[in-house]
Image (tube, rainbow, N blue to C red):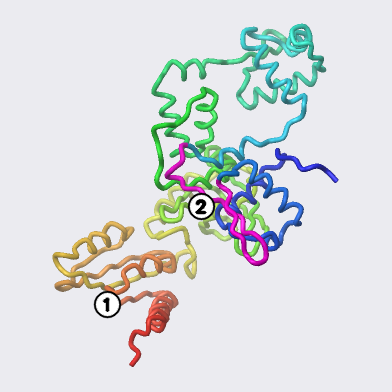
Amino acid sequence: MSDFQELIKSFPKTREYVRDFFVYGFKTRDEFKEKSPRTYDNERRRLESWLGEYVRKDHVANGANISLAIDSSLLDTNPLFRVWKTKSFTDNDIVLHFLILDLLQDAGELTAEEITERLLAEYEALFDVQTVRRKCNAYEKEGLLQKQKAGKTVVYSLDNSLALWIRSNDGILDALAFYQMAGVFGIVGNYLTEQMDFRNQSFRVKHSFCVHTLEEEILLSLLDAMNQKTNVRLEIKSSKNGIANTADCTPLQIFTSTRSGRRFLCGYVKRGRRFSCYRLDTVKAVALSDRSEDYDELLAMLERNREHLWGVSFQGKDRHHIDRLTMTIQALEPTENYIVERLEREGRGGTVTRVARNVYRYEVEVFDCNEMLPWLRTFTGRILSLECTAKSVEQCFYQDLQAMYRMYGIGEE
């Protein structure tokens, strides 16, 4: 039986567990059905080691519910960044990491053979030339080293210009501290500030979605595909039933919900000849495929369609179908003019018309009116009438209203 290891080789598996504890949470050991109890115990122990001060245990009859309790408004950094810093390594990895970087600090440009010889001469560390070359090539790919040809030989060097530039510009560290809290790929800002022994003491973000960092590896692959205008194959695992499948599409834009913080990839599915959106937290892997010859045309088509998009759903009866919704509300004038202003501000392209004193009509055409229901319910008590060409939406709204009446005993004798 292998010993428990705090560090990990496979990030996607741990990403799934961290997301389960942080987003969903409140599950006991027996409620994690997809993995073995031993796997659950190992992931829980890792989580307690990385994020111990944020782990919350609620004891219940059949065990303990484990969750992550993080108040982003009190944090100077995203604690989930620690998950990115837990990759396992061998003894050779860690020794070569420090020795090569230390050697090249003042040595200028060296070949793999010269690096190997000086490691032995200056540090009494014996390594095979091929091992050193593979490590240097890996670091060149990661951007830690520079690689170039000098005649017929390949030389490696360490470029400290970024670190020197950051240290010589006082405001840059503050900018990086802000970026790690508010920007996409904030882990980059976090790495740089830590390298400079600088701690964020100036910025806090009231509404920050810490969990976004778990999706950034997937996001980077998608942005790379968009930049190259290539199609992709997505490996997706449903958040509802856990079923895994694949989807081929042309990635066009990333949508972010201002309400829930969820991020979606909007892509064009050629097989169905329609746009579709995929939640980033359900995408497990991205594989780039062939170049999309009509990428610009698809992007222009998406921009035209967005004016009829309420959220992320294009699921009309067919790809050309658009539903129309009309809502009439009461807003007392002038004391409740803020209601009318809210309709105009949040209506997403809908029109607001004053039809009588204290009565206003809101009209909009969208692909899927189902997405509007949570927003429509916020006007409960003011709605005089609601009509929709999608009768299922209209029926759902009034059925929910009747259920609420029964719950509160409204209308009963």
Q: Amino acid at mark 1?
A: Leu
Choose top left, top right, bottom left or bottom right for residue 32. bottom right
Magenta span includes 197:
no
The image's mark for residue 68 is none
Q: Secondary structure at mark 2?
A: strand
Residue 264 numbered tag: 2
Q: Position of residue 395 (x, y in %)?
A: 42, 79
Give the x, y percent position of residue 46. 67, 44
Q: Amino acid at mark 2?
A: Phe
Please tell me whether residue 64 is drawn above or below residue 401 in the rendered image. Answer: above
* Label 2 neighbour load within 10 Å: few <14, some 14-19, many 20+: many
Q: Which residue is mark 1?
A: 384
> CA gap, disc 1 to disc 2?
35 Å
Can residue 251 be seen here? The reply is yes
Verify CB contact (< 8 Å) between mark 1 and mark 2.
no
Which residue occupies the foreground of this view, 158 or 126? 126
Q: Which residues are magenta?
A: 54-76
Instruction: Choose between 392 and 65: the one closer to the eye.
Output: 65
Compared to residue 215, the image places residue 139 above or below, namely above
Q: Residue at x 35, y 65 (%)?
A: 365
